């Protein structure tokens, strides 16, 4: 009897640890999901910028066109120089770059962000798998603590033996 009680105590302690770990994994998975969402928005912005630059390739200088600014807002403008654009390289530094170089730079950023997205997705899948394994172990411990399932009907009724 003492041994069984000891096992129950150990099972309860492990169940408590599992519960705590699951809460931590839940918070971490939410952080990863938020990062993926933000990254997806940034990727969409990069792809829109790239498409805007690709559209500019075919515009003649002095021609009027619509330039997408983002957020569903466009600007009607005359193209003064369709072969050079201003390109932000970071830390508030903006350079005048040839259109093709800017497109290549955006392609590199898009590739980087897609790799980051893949890495975050793999991390999230791993966390979910670990959570699933912990939940299964928790179910086993709960059954061990509660003992074998008892029938939900009266076994003393005629014909139920």
Image: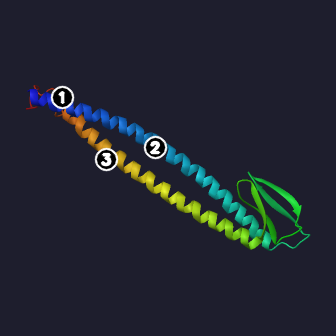
The residue indicated by pointer 2 is 28
Report x, y in % for residue 152: 20, 29
Q: Residue furthest right?
A: 62
The residue indicated by pointer 3 is 133
Crowding around mark 2 (Cα neighbors within 10 Å: few <14, some 14 to 19, many 20+) is: some
Residues under labels 1 and 2: Cα distance? 43 Å
For marks 2 and 3, the one nearer the N-term is: 2
Judge whether residue 107 can be spotted in this image.
Answer: yes
The C terminus lies in quadrant: top left
Residues under labels 1 and 3: Cα distance? 32 Å
Q: Please tell me whether residue 63 is drawn above or below residue 38 in the rendered image.
A: below
Identified at 32% across, 38% down, the residue is 18
Helix, strand or loop at label 3? It is: helix
Tell me the mark number nearer the camera, choosing from 1 and 3. 3
- Asked if the residue at tag 2 contacts the one at tag 1, i.e. Cβ–Cβ closer than 8 Å, the answer is no
Helix, strand or loop at label 1? It is: loop
- Pick whichever, 93 or 16, lies toward us: 93
Report x, y in % for residue 158: 9, 27
Identified at 73% across, 68% down, the residue is 102
- Pick whichever, 93 or 112, lies toward us: 93
For marks 1 and 2, the one nearer the N-term is: 2
The residue indicated by pointer 1 is 153
Crowding around mark 1 (Cα neighbors within 10 Å: few <14, some 14 to 19, many 20+) is: few
The N terminus lies in quadrant: top left
Residues under labels 2 and 3: Cα distance? 16 Å
Crowding around mark 3 (Cα neighbors within 10 Å: few <14, some 14 to 19, many 20+) is: few
62 relative position to 11: left or right: right
């Amino acid at each position: 009897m003492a041994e069984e009680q000891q096992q129950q105590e150990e099972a309860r302690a492990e169940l408590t640890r599992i519960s705590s770990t699951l809460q931590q994994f839940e918070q971490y998975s939410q952080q990863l999901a938020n990062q993926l969402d933000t990254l997806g928005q940034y990727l969409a912005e990069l792809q829109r910028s790239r498409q805007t630059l690709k559209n500019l390739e075919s515009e003649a200088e002095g021609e009027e066109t619509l330039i997408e600014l983002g957020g569903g807002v466009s600007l009607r403008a005359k193209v003064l120089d369709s072969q050079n654009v201003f390109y932000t390289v970071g830390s508030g530094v903006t350079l005048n770059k040839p259109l093709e170089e800017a497109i290549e730079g955006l392609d590199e950023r898009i590739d980087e962000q897609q790799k980051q997205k893949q890495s975050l997705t793999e991390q999230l899948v791993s966390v979910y798998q670990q959570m699933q394994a912990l939940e299964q172990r928790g179910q086993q411990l709960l059954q061990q603590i509660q003992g074998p399932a008892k029938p939900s009907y009266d076994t003393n009724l005629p014909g139920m033996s």
